[in-house]
Amino acid sequence: MVERYAKAAEAIRNAASVIAVTGAGASVESGIPDFRSPGGLWERFPPEEYATIEAYVSDPDRVWALWRDLGKMFRECTPNPGHHALAELEGLGCLRGVITQNIDGLHQAAGNHHVVEYHGNASRLVCLSCKRRMPLDTGREYTHAPLCDCGGLMKPDVVLFGEVIPVYAQMESQNLAREADVVIVVGTSATVYPAAEIPALAKRHGAYIIECNLEPTDFTPYITDAFLQGPAGKTLPYLLDTVRG
Ligand code: APR
């Protein structure tokens, strides 16, 4: 296992461009459950009832209750050692950017500056009518789905199933993936597209793929070059220390 870290660290040190692609597993040690592990969010809140744009528009108050509670949870969570390790890699000049599927803002809170929020951010609201965006008012209770000043229904500024990925996030992620020499894939089940296409695109352009996860995923046998098994709060700091030498 030590040899895997040494090879992964050498690839990072020799790379002109390193990016990270993260999923919910990167935030589990901050207290935010992931979606598909046993006990995950989708086990408690079936996504077809709580995470589609159709469900939100047809019963905003019911669906809003989940996102309001998630927003509260996110506000109480802080970055874990895995987030901090990615921020320190950026500080060393060894990480060009983070493409995250997560909506919790923890990479920015840890100190990463170039973060592509592929599925948006739950700390913002967006109006379905006029597209106005505004921060979630942390002092407000929001007992009902919020309405915009224009009268339109507002929703969390996250990509629900049935919605498209923001154009900027798509374009920036594809550019970063094409130019990456190394991709550090952290805590994703590699099951949701188009996000799961990003590491595969980088691989097709010659990138070395490092995967940090508790267990193998669909990526592991096909595109992963170095599989670092374990919790991200342990694997990423160890990888950082190995890069430092
Ligand atoms: N460290 C590393 N990996 C972990 C940890 C941990 N501490 N805890 C869980 N994992 C791994 C799991 O083994 C799993 O492979 O993280 C992955 C989490 O998978 P999902 O729950 O499917 O989350 P994610 O891949 O981010 O889901 C993608 O699906 O529902 C949508 O929009 C949602 O962004 C989300 C997308």
Image (cartoon, helix red, strand yellow):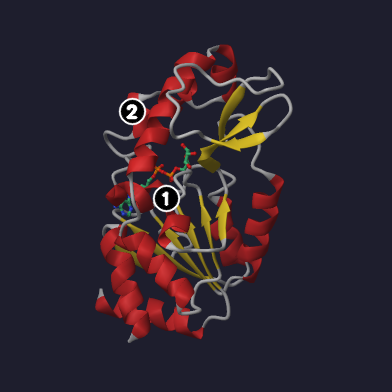
Residue sitting nearer the eye, 191 or 31: 31
Most extreme residue toward the top is: 58
Residue sitting nearer the eye, 135 or 46: 135
> Do we see residue 200 in this rendering?
yes
Residue beneath label 2, please? Answer: 43
User: Which element is circle 1 on?
Assistant: loop
Q: Is residue 240 above or below residue 125?
A: below
Query: Viewed as shown, does residue 241 lie left or right of 92?
Result: left
Query: Viewed as shown, does residue 124 lie left or right of 50?
Result: right
Disc 2 and disc 1: Cα gap in Å? 17 Å
Residue beneath label 1, please? Answer: 188
The residue drawn where x is 42% and y is 52% is 106
The amino acid pointed to by label 2 is Glu
Q: Quadrant of the C terminus?
A: bottom left
Q: Is residue 109 above or below residue 135?
A: below
Q: For ligand 1, tell me if the residue under mark 1 lies within 8 Å.
A: yes
Most extreme residue toward the front is: 139
User: Which element is circle 2 on?
Assistant: helix
Q: Earlier in the sequence, mark 2 or mark 1?
A: 2
The residue drawn where x is 52% and y is 19% is 145
The answer to which image quadrant residue 228 occupies is bottom left
